[in-house]
Image (cartoon, rainbow, N blue to C red):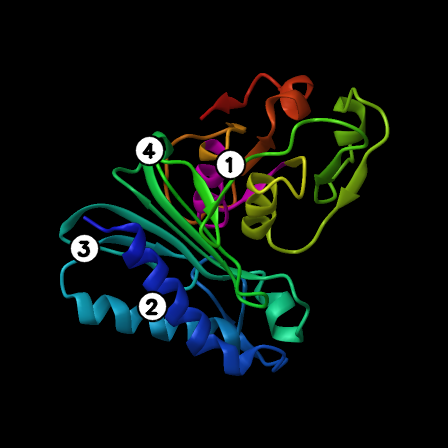
Amino acid sequence: MLTVEDLVDLALRIKERASSYIGADREFSYTSAGGDTARAVDEAAQEELSKWIDERGSHPDVLSEESGLIRGKEPGVLLIDPIDGSSNADRGIPFACVSIAYSLSYSLRDLDKAVILDIFRGDLYYAEKGSGSFKNGSKIKVRKFRGTPVIYAPCQHDDSLKERIAFGHIARRDLGSVALGLAYVASGQIDALIDLRNNLRIVDLAAGLLLVKEAGGSVYLNHIDVKGLERSFSIVAGAREAVKDLLIPHLKEL
């Protein structure tokens, strides 16, 4: 079974391998398994992931945004976006990360370990089920709800989000990496992350979900099972006081 240390080692290797391509502004004509534009920074990150898989020999299933599903012989599944926020990374915009989660099964209720590594600042977020969430070795908690909420909320198609928010004025952000946004929620820098477009992939969310849960936050999703790289997820995550009035019927608590 994979350990948190295994995930940290993989994240550090990917960061190091991809670092030469940060700010390279190199897009390719093909797309990733997840359907996004492939970039040099993505390709480098995936090459390091493939090397890690080959070196291990035996591994769990690996679902990667870049390569899709790679079957393994060990229990569980590794859910990874080698570079989440690769458009930012490609242009040198400092908001992108390596996102890795290990689940004991294809149910998100079995998320067991998570690592998010900020590839610009080097901040390392990690969690293990039942053991809390940490940033650079220090325990983190979601922010106690007070004042004007800062919410990571990508623009909705009909922008109906504003009609659901019951606590008045908010400071709204859309920073280009949902995974790192969830790490910010877990560490109390952002009050909540809300995306109701049914347009997120599980590899963008999995690690951050466990971080928020282990940091004392609440997480609500429209799907609990992992079924591939389809863009089909909606999410509300944050301190319970910040998200309790945003719950809508089709979201389930994780």
Q: Is residue 35 visible?
A: no
Q: Which residue is mark 2?
A: 49
Q: Which residues are magenta?
A: 194-213
Real-space Cα separation, disc 2 to disc 4, in angstroms:
23 Å
The mark lying in front, picked from 3 and 1, is 1
Please state the horizontal and vertical placement of residue 34, each as a whole percent of the image.
46, 57
Q: Which residue is mark 1?
A: 212
Q: Which residue is mark 4?
A: 107
The amino acid type of the residue labelled 3 equals: Gly
Real-space Cα separation, disc 1 to disc 4, in angstroms:
17 Å
The tag earlier along the polypeptide, 4 or 3, is 3
Question: The C terminus lies in which quarter of the figure?
Answer: top left
The amino acid type of the residue labelled 2 equals: Leu
207 drawn magenta:
yes
Label 3 close to label 2 by CB (< 8 Å)? no
The mark lying in front, picked from 3 and 2, is 2
170 horizontally vs 86: left or right: right
Characterize the magenta stretch by its predominant secondary structure.
helix
The residue drawn where x is 44% and y is 46% is 207
Q: Residues within 10 Å of mark 3 (few under 14, many from 20)?
A: some
The secondary structure type at the circle numbered 1 is helix
